[in-house]
Image (spheres, rainbow, N blue to C red):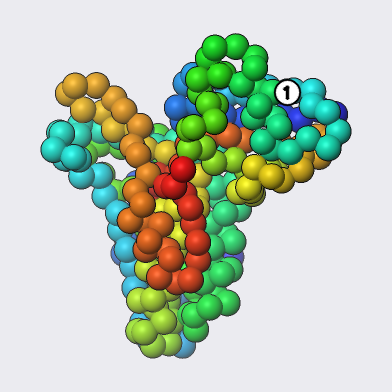
Amino acid sequence: MHLPRVSIQAADFDLSAEVASLRRGDGGVGAVVSFVGTVRDVSAGQDVLRMELEHYPGMTEASIEAMIDAAQARFDIRAVRVIHRVGTLEAGDQIVLVVVSSAHRGPCFQACEFLMDYLKTQAPFWKKECTPEGAHWVDARSGDDEALRRWGVDSGNASQ
Amino acid sequence: MKVTLKFFASLREALGTGGTLEVPDGATVADVRGLLQARDAAHAQALASGRALRCALNQVLCPESTLVSEGAELAFFPPVTGG
């Protein structure tokens, strides 16, 4: 069975199961790097109780597929899996998973970071934080644009 | 020509999920934003020119100078904050 590269889902994910799926049947894999993003319980000094994740169905999947194509073209990697959760997430919950496999560790580390930098600034997701004082939309960070610029890619997401 | 509009996040809360809009041939994304601003106070505020917004034409991020085409899906939304 061909595994999907991208899943946008409300359900949680299992890192070990995803790593095992990505490695299965590929004896050339010598390195696997994964990143898991989680919901912090504090943001800008405020307690965060939960978070609402909204996305643009269709565009989200297509934009992440395009990022994976870019990573495959740029780095010597074998396979990629991205899962991003949407809906209501509690503090401590997992939000996002990126797993990359390759023959050697160098491109694997790089591709994982590249994909996260891309995803933060180019994939259409929006976070709303729910605090004891009320709910608010999270502002985009210019630091995320700078992270993508390290790869020679201009984002302009957080700029005016 | 007719375009389908979509709004997300804070824009969706202010304006709803979208709808369809008749726009003149040769209109750019910026022209459509201007037409929408003139609709009512809520649109004027949510789409105000000083506000940093991103747009996507047929589900691909684009600059506001992009020409829209008949039947296009045009989305406006705040800077993205996933990951």
Position of residue B45 measured from the top left corner of the image (x, y, whole percent) = 50, 20
The quarter of the rendered structure image containing the N terminus of chain A is: bottom right
Residue A132, can we see it? yes
In the image, is residue B19 above or below residue A92?
A: above
Position of residue A147 measured from the top left corner of the image (x, y, whole percent) = 37, 63
Disc 1 secondary structure class: strand
Say which residue appears at 33% left-offset and 56% top-offset: A143
Say which residue appears at 36% left-offset and 52% top-offset: A142
Q: Amino acid at mark 1?
A: Thr
In the image, is residue A109 above or below residue B74?
A: below
Query: What chain does mark 1 sit on?
Result: B
Return the residue nearer the eye: A5 or A67: A67
Position of residue A21 measured from the top left corner of the image (x, y, whole percent) = 43, 68
Query: Would you name the residue on which mark 1 appears?
Result: B20
Position of residue A145 measured from the top left corner of the image (x, y, whole percent) = 41, 57
Residue A25, can we see it? no
Return the residue nearer the eye: B56 or A17: B56
Say which residue appears at 54% left-offset and 75% top-offset: A72
Q: Is residue A116 left or right of residue A16?
A: right
